[in-house]
Amino acid sequence: MPRLAVDLTAVRRSRDLRLVTIGQAAATLGTQAALVAIPYQVFVLTRSARLVGLVGAVELGPLIAGALVGGAWSDRFDRRTVLLAGQVVVSLTAGLLLVAARLDPHVGFVFALAGVLAGATAIVQVARAAVVPKLAGPRYLRSAIAVNFGVAQLSSVVGPALAGPLIALGGVEAVYGLVAAGFAAMLAVTLPLPPLRPDEPDAQHEPIGRSIAGGLRFVGANRALLGSFVIDLSAMTFGMPRALFAVLSLTVFDAGPEGTGLLYSSVALGALVAAIFTGWLEHARWLGRITIAAVVVWGLAIAAAGLAPTIWICAALLAAAGAADSVSAVCRSVINQAVTPEHMRGRMSSVFMLVVTSGPRLGDLESGIAASLLTVTAAVSAGGLLCLVGVGAVMLAFPQLAAYDGHREERRFAA
């Protein structure tokens, strides 16, 4: 019988990996709560679904810059130092959001701080992703990726679930306080780590732009790797309606901020349950085909969620979508790390982070525009159907993804 439960061996055997994982949990708790608080605050200030969708567009530029620069820094400098610097910026930005929330800010100021928060968070996430494979080692790579993803999803469940009651009790400033505290905790567990320098740092210190371009060329040259990025970007851009969760809760289901938190946390709850039972993926061979199937399930579940008559049915369908995304994410992460040499991990992780985080933000923009042209429920369903169209396009453009042989690539990685 194949193993079902996730393998914890990687974190049991490595103290440093445990510290990174604990820090990830604390930081993700805050950032996931902020994903509820910022759109909610914008909607309360403006009552505009279009401006709620614009939050994602505002965050996109800083996110791209932070991820690309953070990836280049992570392949050149001590990754521990990069982690610490990013964590300090995030904590300070969250503190400014907290102060501003008490002063009834202009929505433009909220947008500006949201952009800074997105950029600094991207730097932290890229540096953290770059150190995990080295701390885990080739033998425990899948275990480490599954555990880290599961921990992130647990925080993604708790964060939005806390956000709703926190907003109801103490306003959005209570959530921003949680963000600052989460990254302060991550800072505390990062300090005991030893230096985490790349094995082959850029000795020539080529210009940052040239270093980033080298990373992009590497990603573009591997068709299976690029296909895994494109299929996720398509799924998130068209099929992630998170910007509409507050609108759905307040105007369709009449469930208030608690309902908003429920919809956000439902996706992560489904992903968490699936991540706990990813042991069966530990020895799976055709990870690309599993990824494709999982994205199809995601699109179908999102399309059905737009037709849900109650918030509980909608939440259940979003949980099913999250479970499919969890399987896809673990498979894609293993593919990405297995085909990438150590000296390119920071820059590859930066592209991965761009896809993972910019896709939902593009989805925010798409959802906001669609909801302004259609009804909010029709916008959700249309996005799920467009996701399925995107899967077909990726299969035609990147047949190497379906042909990816995990056993062969991991033998090469171990060597």
Image: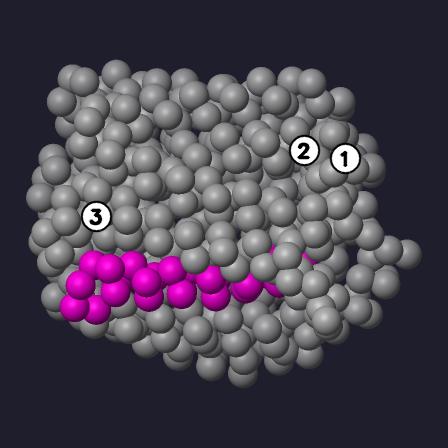
Q: State whether residue 32 is above or below residue 276.
A: above
- The residue where tag 3 is placed is 259
Mark positioned earlier in the residue sequence (3 or 1): 1
Q: Nearer the viewer, residue 231 or 19?
A: 19
Q: Magenta region's main secondary structure?
A: helix
Dot 2: element: helix
- Residue 185 point in image, percent of width and height: 52, 21
Q: Nearer the viewer, residue 356 or 304?
A: 304
- Residue 167 point in image, percent of width and height: 22, 31
- The residue where tag 1 is placed is 14
Residue type at mark 2: give it.
Arg
Give left or right: position of 126 versus 311: right
Mark positioned earlier in the residue sequence (2 or 3): 2
Give left or right: position of 374 versus 17: left
Instruction: Look at the image and tell me whether residue 327 can be seen.
Output: yes
Q: State whether residue 64 is above or below residue 240.
A: above
Q: Residues within 10 Å of mark 1 (few under 14, many from 20)?
A: few
Q: Residue furthest right?
A: 415
Q: Residue furthest front?
A: 1
At 48% from the left edge and 47% from the top edge, which residue is drawn?
Answer: 153
Residue type at mark 1: give it.
Ser
> What colour scheme was applied to this rendering of the protein?
one colour
Residue type at mark 3: give it.
Gly
At 25% from the left edge and 23% from the top edge, which residue is drawn?
Answer: 173
The magenta segment: 308-334
Which dot marks residue 18?
2
Cβ atoms at labels 1 and 2 below 8 Å apart: yes
> What is the distance, in whole Å, between disc 3 and disc 1 at their CAs?
39 Å
At 54% from the left edge and 64% from the top edge, which residue is drawn?
Answer: 328
Q: Residues within 10 Å of mark 2 (few under 14, many from 20)?
A: some
